[in-house]
Image: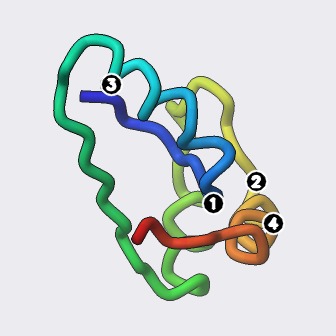
Amino acid sequence: MIDRTNVDPKQRENFLKIASEHSGPAHAGCLLVEPKLCMARVGARTDHETNPKPFVVNLMKGRLRAPT
């Protein structure tokens, strides 16, 4: 299992390749959370290794291409 935020097909491509090379299945999940709630959650996180800022939510939202 790989827990990543890959917002577009190009970003997911490498992980699909790895799964294919190892004859493993590849599945994607897309959690759709309202941006306002997501920003509140991000803003409240103090123990995350990268300590993202709420504005990152808007950046990612604008780039998101849900898996098909």
Residue beneath disc 3:
20
CA distance for labels 3 and 1: 37 Å
Residue beneath disc 1:
43
Residue beneath disc 4:
59
Mark 3 or mark 1, earlier in chain: 3
Q: Position of residue 47 (x, y in %)?
A: 51, 31
Mark 2 or mark 4, earlier in chain: 2
CA distance for labels 4 and 1: 15 Å
Please tell me whether mark 4 or mark 1 is closer to you in this view.
4
Task: Give the vertical position of 47 relative to 40 (above or below).
Answer: above
CA distance for labels 1 and 2: 6 Å
Looking at the picture, which amino acid does disc 3 mark? Ser
Mark 1, other Cα within 10 Å: few <14 / some 14–19 / many ≥20:
some
Whether residues under marks 4 and 1 lie with C-beta atoms below 8 angstroms apart, the answer is no
Whether residues under marks 1 and 2 lie with C-beta atoms below 8 angstroms apart, the answer is yes
Q: Residue at x 75, y 68 (%)?
A: 63
Q: Quadrant of the N terminus?
A: top left
Please tell me whether mark 2 or mark 4 is closer to you in this view.
4
Q: Residue at x 18, y 24 (%)?
A: 24
CA distance for labels 3 and 2: 34 Å
Residue beneath disc 2:
53
Please tell me whether mark 3 or mark 4 is closer to you in this view.
3
Q: Position of residue 37 (x, y in %)?
A: 50, 81
Is residue 47 toward the left or the right of residue 9 in the image?
left
